[in-house]
Image: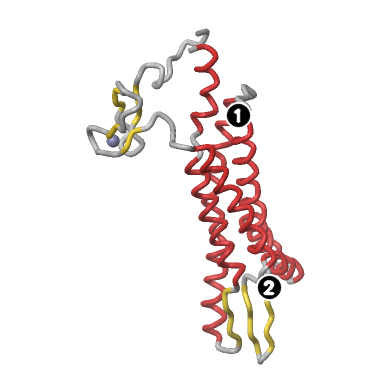
């Protein structure tokens, strides 16, 4: 080994995911529980790569109807108008409200797609046991966790719009089927990021030096 550090797995130790207690790992085959809080212990998240792939692909499938189907339907004086996320963005640009358009575009179209592409890239690089810029790839994973918090923004926008317009009484507004698929994209992407184990990025070091 040419590095100065030793990993917990090499030392026969497992960190508890729930309370972060460092536990001894004598037998790898036995299902272990944390002696302090009782949570299941595992050196790596179980089936991390397969589960993350499944969730990433599901999210990509949901992403299509989320963007193609209407997210809101406004009924005003007997006239119904349905809007997808992109037609909403275009409407706000044409109305001169480009900051709102930018927020919706970034939060609803750009962020979910970037997050899914980053996760797919990390999965491919881990499967290929790549040693390429591991530190940067770990940072990339952290970015997906940070930006993920912003992808619920347009569900809030739809909710606020529905409340505001319905209060006015002249028009009624309904959330369209696109909103449901959009929610599914957000949830599956969140679960995908959670099921990915960033320690896999560094496991190559152990198999080479350890
Ligand atoms: Zn614990």
Going from N to C along the chain, the mark reached first, 2 or 1, is: 2
Residue tagged 2: 83
Residue 110, image x and y in percent? 67, 52
In the picture as drawn, the residue positioned furthest to the front comes out as: 29
Residue tagged 1: 136
In the picture as drawn, the residue positioned furthest to the left comes out as: 36
Q: Residue at x 62, y 40 (%)?
A: 120
**Which color scheme does this rendered protein use?**
secondary structure
Left/right placement of residue 10 relative to residue 48 reads left
**Ligand 1 closer than 8 Å to label 2 CB:** no
Q: Residue at x 59, y 80 (%)?
A: 173
Q: Quadrant of residue 176?
A: bottom right
With respect to residue 14, does 149 lie above or below? below
How far is the residue under mark 2 from the one under mark 1?
39 Å
Q: Residues within 10 Å of mark 1 (few under 14, many from 20)?
A: few
| SS label for mark 2 | strand
């Amino acid at each position: 080994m040419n590095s100065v550090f030793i990993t917990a797995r090499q030392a026969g130790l497992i960190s508890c995911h729930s309370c972060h207690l460092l536990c001894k790992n004598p037998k790898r085959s036995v299902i272990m529980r944390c002696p302090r809080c009782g949570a299941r212990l595992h050196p790596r998240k179980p089936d991390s790569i397969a589960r993350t792939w499944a969730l990433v692909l599901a999210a990509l499938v949901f992403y299509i109807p989320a963007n193609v189907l209407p997210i809101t339907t406004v009924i005003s004086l007997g006239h119904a108008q349905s809007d997808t996320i992109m037609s909403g963005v275009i409407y706000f640009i044409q109305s001169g409200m480009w900051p709102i358009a930018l927020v919706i575009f970034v939060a609803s179209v750009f962020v979910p797609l970037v997050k899914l592409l980053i996760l797919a890239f990390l999965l491919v690089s881990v499967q290929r046991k790549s040693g390429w810029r591991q530190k940067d790839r770990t940072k990339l994973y952290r970015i997906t966790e940070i930006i993920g918090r912003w992808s619920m923004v347009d569900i809030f926008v739809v909710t606020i719009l529905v409340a505001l317009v319905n209060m006015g009484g002249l028009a009624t507004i309904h959330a369209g089927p696109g909103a449901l698929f959009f929610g599914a994209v957000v949830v599956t992407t969140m679960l995908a990021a959670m099921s990915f184990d960033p320690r896999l990025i560094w496991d190559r070091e152990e198999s080479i030096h350890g």
